[in-house]
Image: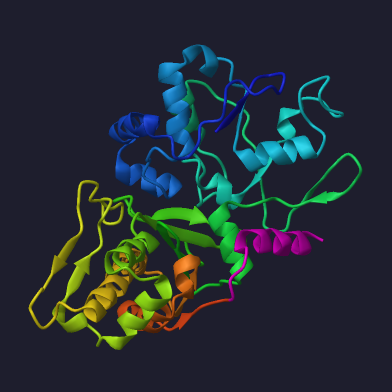
């Protein structure tokens, strides 16, 4: 959250998405408006990561700063504004023209006060959070650019997951599973999604469609911990897993080592079930780790599928997607054809594709 005063100056250091101080503000907003109504209006049930909750926290904890807010932006909105020559007087060529702030649908959809059904902002929610109205960035279409002082075209930008979907070439029917330390599961959908449980966030994408998204806490770290336990590297862990039969002889790893976000089990721990003398082998433990990690991500996939989003293939990206065992076992666990694009910086590729589209 980047808040600006009337002179275009940043009022306070930006509040990051992973700053959980606004968790109480999220609960307060849900109590005031109701989860179902918020999901219907914005596609989201507030959690601490959304801008709406940051503004409420600012109002409650720094009222002197909240009172100065003339405009609210996200980082790429502010960067684009500055790159186009706008900013505080004496620090920019074009001055503090706050109405020239611009954003895109994907980042707007993560604020908690943008409406996917109308494409406009929900001013009532903004005012309820901040305490007064403010200038918000104009929401640009997927190929709608702006210009800088030299007349150069500037793309609308995108959030990181939306950029990755664009970069990997995902379209309707595709679900992207990013397997890093934690995991994200996001699908490209032609229709908006509404989930009043808050499990699936109803974001927009960078192509004009929607990007229902689920985040999980336990992904590649599951493989990391079992590889350490077995004293092997990831290549050997993969070989061991592929040497075992599907189902790992009944050995099941419940992979919630650090609690879990999807399903919402913050205090959960991991469990190893089905241990027998025959089943408890190095090979089966490696297989159980891969199957358990993929099953955890599969819970997110099932949540997206449960909203009626049609899914025809899964695209695996991220470090753990390069595991041969993950690639071979994923179709069996997920129940979808799986493709693994070549490793790449897909967010950056998405930005390049967007720039080409604007041109």
| Residue name at image x 15 percent, y 77 percent | 280
Q: Which residue is drawn at 51% across and 67% down?
A: 190
Q: In which quarter of the image is residue 14?
A: top right
Question: Looking at this view, is 255 or 88 the one in front?
Answer: 255
- The x, y position of residue 253, in whole percent, is 21, 68
Rendered view: 210 above or below 196: below
Q: Quadrant of the N terminus?
A: top right
| Residue 188 belongs to the span the image colors magenta | no
Viewer-nearest residue: 141 or 87: 87
Residue 332: image x %, image y %?
32, 83
Range of residues picked out in magenta: 342-359
Q: Which residue is drawn at 46% across and 34% down?
A: 52
Q: Is residue 14 visible?
A: yes
> Which residue is farthest left?
276
Image-based side of 356 in relation to 198, left or right: right
User: Horizontally, is 288 left or right of 62 in the view?
Assistant: left
Residue 352: within the magenta? yes
Which residue is outermost to the right?
Answer: 150
Image x and y of residue 88, in percent: 76, 22
- Magenta-colored segment: predominant secondary structure: helix
**Picture quarter with the C terminus:** bottom right
Q: Which residue appears farthest toward the front when viewing the image? A: 231
């Amino acid at each position: 959250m980047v808040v600006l005063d009337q002179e275009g100056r940043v009022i306070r250091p930006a509040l990051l998405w992973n700053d959980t101080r606004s968790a109480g503000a999220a609960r307060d907003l849900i109590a005031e408006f109701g989860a179902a109504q918020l999901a219907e209006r914005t596609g989201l049930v507030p959690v601490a990561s959304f801008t709406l909750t940051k503004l409420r926290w600012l109002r409650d904890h720094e009222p002197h700063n909240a009172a100065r807010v003339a405009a609210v932006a996200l980082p790429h909105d502010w960067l684009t504004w500055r790159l186009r020559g706008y900013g505080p007087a004496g620090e920019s060529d074009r001055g503090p023209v706050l109405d020239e702030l611009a954003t895109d649908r994907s980042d707007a959809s993560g604020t908690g006060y943008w409406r996917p059904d109308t494409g406009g902002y929900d001013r009532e929610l903004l005012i309820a959070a901040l305490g007064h109205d403010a200038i918000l960035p104009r929401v640009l279409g997927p190929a709608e650019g702006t210009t800088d002082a030299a007349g150069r075209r500037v793309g609308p930008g995108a959030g990181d997951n939306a950029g990755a979907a664009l970069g990997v070439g995902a379209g309707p029917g595709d679900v992207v599973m990013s397997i890093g330390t934690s995991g994200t599961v996001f699908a490209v959908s032609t229709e908006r999604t509404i989930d009043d449980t808050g499990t699936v966030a109803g974001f927009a994408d960078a192509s004009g469609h929607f990007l229902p998204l689920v985040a999980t806490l336990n992904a590649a770290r599951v493989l990391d911990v079992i590889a350490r336990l077995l004293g092997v590297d990831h290549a050997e862990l993969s070989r061991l897993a592929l040497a075992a039969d599907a189902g790992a002889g009944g050995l099941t790893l419940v992979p919630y080592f650090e609690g879990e976000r999807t399903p919402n089990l913050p205090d959960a721990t991991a469990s190893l079930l089905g241990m027998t003398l025959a089943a408890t082998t190095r090979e089966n433990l490696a297989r159980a780790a891969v199957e358990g990690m993929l099953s955890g991500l599969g819970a997110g996939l099932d949540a997206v599928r449960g909203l009626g989003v049609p899914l025809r293939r899964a695209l695996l990206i991220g470090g753990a997607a390069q595991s041969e065992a993950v690639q071979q076992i994923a179709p069996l666990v997920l129940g979808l054809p799986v493709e693994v694009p070549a490793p790449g910086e897909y967010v950056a590729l998405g930005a390049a594709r967007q720039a080409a589209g604007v041109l």
